């Protein structure tokens, strides 16, 4: 019998709970894969030995320790090396790559919302937005992606309440439905979720302030079985998803050995 493969994992307790489900552990055990929790208080070299380190932690100190460990343990596969995912976590560099995609005549079109990176005094945001020609309302997202941290600013004055560094994006009306696309290797899975409703002129004049919407399009907002207008409900064409998956893998994650299933991207 082949030797067991040891996967050391460093995940938040939330992530360990959602990812390391009993079913996954059982399947892994059958395939000779053992998951071992990494103790973040101890040096990595004193633990293991590991064949793979699976992590989804950020933070400068953790990244430094991981890079140092990679230097001294080149035989261990780290999913994913901090340097390889940096540009993917950064919402500015992430979208820059997407905007370079030339997908004309590919069964659909891919658009990137007009966006502005802000890292200045919040009081100067309204003027910066004006100079960039962005129209309200604006979606505000922290520069370094943190899942579900989003706000919507309806009026110029409220922009001063935001906390840079962040990106501001024009709100793209998308019919209140979003398709979330999960890609692991060659497998592509699409789910339909409820999203923010379209915004019209009336909403703009009747609303002011910054609204947080952390749970929008989360798993509980499934629209799989909803009775939707077929125009809105129709899934993106398969060939478009395949091209997108291929191109994004090539441009965003070339050095990544495996795109771990808990990374997902949204297509609106
Ligand atoms: N520019 C935009 N215009 C309109 N709606 C948007 C825009 N950006 C984001 N949204 C809404 O916010 C939701 C989440 O956006 P986004 O995918 O950027 O966040 P996220 O934190 O990366 O999400 P996740 O972690 O679930 O992948 C989308 O489902 C969509 O409803
Ligand atoms: O359940 P879906 O709609 O797939 O949304 C996921 C997000 O896209 C992920 O970013 C979350 O993981 P992180 O909280 O590690 O970013 C992930 O957190 P989870 O693994 O704890 O459920 C989910 O919130």
Image: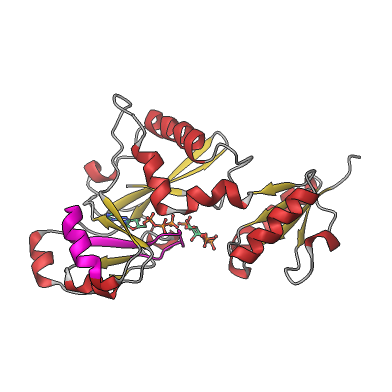
Q: Quadrant of the N terminus?
A: top right
Question: How many numbered marks, from 0 up?
Answer: 0
> To which quarter of the image does residue 104 belong?
top left
Q: Is residue 131 visible?
A: yes
Q: Which residue is more in the foreground, 245 or 143?
A: 143
Occupied quadrant, residue 163: bottom left
Q: Nearer the viewer, residue 1 or 151?
A: 151
- The residue sitting at 36% across, 33% down in the picture is 101
What residue is shown at x 21% (from left), y 52% (from top)?
A: 173
Q: Is residue 214 above or below residue 252?
A: below
What residue is drawn where x is 77% and y is 47%? 76
Task: Give the quadrant of residue 254.
Answer: top right
Q: Is residue 126 magenta?
A: yes
Question: Is 19 situated left or right of 42 in this image?
Answer: left
Location of residue 157 in the rendering, given as x and y in whole percent from the top left corner: 17, 73
Q: Position of residue 65 (x, y in %)?
A: 70, 60
Asked whether, in this view, residue 53 is left or right of residue 215, the answer is right
The residue at 61%/52% (across/down) is 82
Residue that protrudes farthest toward the top in the picture: 105
Q: Position of residue 74 (x, y in %)?
A: 78, 44
Asked if residue 191 can be seen in this view, the reply is no
Q: How is the image coloured?
A: secondary structure
Question: Magenta stretch: residue 125 in it?
Answer: yes
Relative placement, left or right, of 219 versus 81 is: left
Residue furthest out toward the right:
1
Instruction: Please provide percent x and percent y for residue 13.
Output: 63, 69
Residue interval drawn in magenta: 124-150
């Amino acid at each position: 019998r082949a030797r067991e493969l040891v996967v050391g994992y460093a995940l938040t307790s939330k992530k360990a709970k959602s990812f390391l489900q009993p079913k996954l552990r059982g399947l892994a055990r059958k395939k000779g894969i053992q998951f071992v929790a990494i103790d973040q208080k101890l040096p990595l070299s004193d633990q293991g030995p590991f064949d793979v380190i699976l992590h989804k932690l950020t933070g400068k100190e953790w990244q430094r320790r991981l890079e140092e460990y990679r230097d001294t343990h080149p035989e261990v596969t780290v999913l994913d090396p901090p340097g390889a995912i940096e540009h993917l976590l950064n919402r500015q560099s992430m979208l820059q790559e997407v905007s370079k995609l030339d997908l004309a005549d590919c069964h659909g079109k891919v658009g990137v919302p007009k966006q502005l990176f802000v890292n200045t005094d919040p009081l100067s945001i309204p003027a910066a937005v004006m100079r960039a020609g962005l129209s309200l309302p604006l979606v505000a997202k922290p520069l370094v992606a943190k899942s579900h941290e989003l706000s919507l600013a309806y009026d110029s004055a409220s922009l001063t309440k935001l906390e840079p560094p962040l990106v501001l994006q024009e709100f793209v009306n998308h019919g209140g439905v979003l398709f979330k696309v999960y890609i692991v290797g060659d497998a592509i899975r699409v789910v339909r979720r409820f999203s923010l409703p379209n915004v019209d002129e009336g909403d703009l004049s009747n609303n002011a302030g910054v609204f947080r919407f952390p749970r929008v399009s989360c798993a509980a907002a499934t629209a799989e079985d909803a009775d939707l207008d077929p125009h809105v409900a129709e899934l993106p064409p398969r060939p478009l998803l395949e091209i997108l998956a291929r191109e994004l893998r090539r441009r965003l994650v070339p050095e990544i050995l495996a795109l771990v299933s808990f990374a997902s991207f949204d297509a609106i």
